[in-house]
Image (cartoon, rainbow, N blue to C red):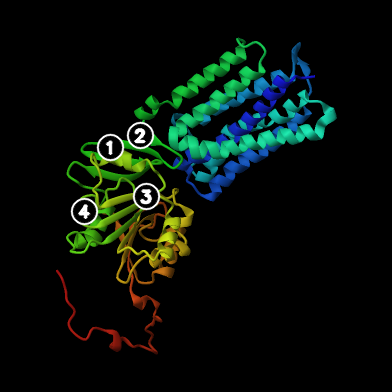
Amino acid sequence: MINSRQVFMLFAVILIEGYVVLSTELLAIRQTITYTGSGTDTVAIIIAAVLMPLAFGYQHGGRFRPHRKRGKLVSVRKKLILNLVLAALVLVPGMSWIFMEYFFKTLLPDMGITHRLFQISVYSAIFLAIPVYLLGQTIPLVSNYFSKNRLSSITGRILFFSTVGSFMGAVFSTIVLMPHIGVHHTVTLNFILLSSLVVMLIKRKTSEPVWVMLGLTIIALFLNSNSVMSDMGIVHNNQYNTAQVLNLGNERHLLLNGNWSSMYNTYGRKHAYIEFAEKVAIDPIRESATPKEILIIGAGAFTLGYEDTTNHYTYIDLDHDLLETAEKFILKGKIKENKTFLVEEARAFLARSIREKKTYDFIYLDAYLGGMSIPEHLVTREFFQQIKDCLPEGGVFISNFIASPNFSNSLSRNLDSTVRSVMPYVNRAVIYDQYYVYDNDPDMMVNVAYIYRKNRDDEKKRTVYTDDKNTLFFDKPQQIPRSEF
């Protein structure tokens, strides 16, 4: 018969195990965005790599019986402690940023595994399935300590505490810990919790498993420390972005989740696609008598329009740390008073603007970080319709996509079709000085700008000239058009 203190300890073990499993799952989803993208396909693989091993862990743990191995008794307590130590041993490299850099960028490509779904599958099979399988045995193993006469009551309480732990792992780790202490420190906390479980379960607090767990925790603490992050150029690491700053000559680069997001140098130069947008859409209104309303979706390092002190800018992004990072490391100065930064989701912001009948003279969309890091909800027809609804008559929309310059892959073709289904008369400009019309490489992805000016004629029925019905003589200019050379 166990006493009340032991009961409390056992339920604490169950709660902490539930927290660690869910927190590990979300940390894996967050950290692999840099390497395999953020689509539902990769998330589904990670979830599957947690749920199935968890189920098998439940089943295997329920079948465990104390037995002798090599003359030594393997008790329930020893099995629990061994599982925790082995799980931590696998998670130390699997949750460390340095090892993940090597694993995804060097080890897997050297093995010929380059497809992102294969990469995330290999990672999940090794660094998620194994530790989750071991941790999943905790609940059935712990249940051995409770009276079988109150099985239904105890089972309900066990599942309650396990679910509460999972709830905390899902909510507390993402909403509280990641944005305030960073992803890397949230990882370290999981190892501290695993160590605490070993200390709680073991009888002799100075035995070998305790020292092994403390050693693994210290290693995890070092691999995820601020000093290591700083050495890798990481300046912030929250639930949305791992932000790195690289200084190359006189250029200061901001990388978000491994993608080259923004650049600013000592002479005010920026990425070519940013300078293109400024040339065609901001320079003509920079000295406007009436300030224009400009909306930028995807703040980056706030370089677009940074020098403009006339027009009103609203930058929106989910990453609340971007402004401080940009001002400190990239811009080397504060953004001007005519600029506002709002931490908000793009579609929610646009929906609110539509309800309030708020429009913007110029909307710039720069929320796509690369071929794998494309927010799926920001490429739909409904999203582009929201943008169009926030433009007044004559308002301008420009987007920066990472796409094939020659429509050599399905992403570029379908994206183009989606944009044109809402904005029929849109220009497409390839912002790349090595662009050749004969290049059909489907893997070649460059900056492609879509430029649209809202016009009431968009809704008119379109005419197609044919040999049978040709109304060109009504439509062609009736005077010599202006030419600029």
What residue is shown at x 65% (from left), y 40% (from top)? 51
Q: Give the CA distance from mark 1 to mark 4.
A: 19 Å
Q: Earlier in the sequence, mark 1 or mark 4?
A: 4
Q: Give the CA distance from mark 2 to mark 1.
A: 10 Å
Q: Earlier in the sequence, mark 2 or mark 3?
A: 2
The quadrant in which the N terminus is found is top right
Residue at disc 1, secondary structure: helix
Q: Amino acid at mark 2?
A: Val
Tag in front: 2 or 3: 3
Asked if marks 2 and 1 touch (Cβ < 8 Å), the reply is yes
Q: Earlier in the sequence, mark 4 or mark 2?
A: 2
Q: Give the CA distance from mark 1 to mark 3.
A: 18 Å
The quadrant in which the C terminus is found is bottom left
- Identify the residue under disc 3: 342
Q: Position of residue 159 (x, y in %)?
A: 71, 36
- Identify the residue under disc 4: 308
- Identify the residue under disc 1: 328
Nearest the eye: 212 or 310 = 310
Asked if marks 1 and 4 touch (Cβ < 8 Å), the reply is no
Q: Position of residue 170 (x, y in %)?
A: 57, 39
Question: Can see residue 96?
Answer: no
Nearest the eye: 239 or 473 = 239
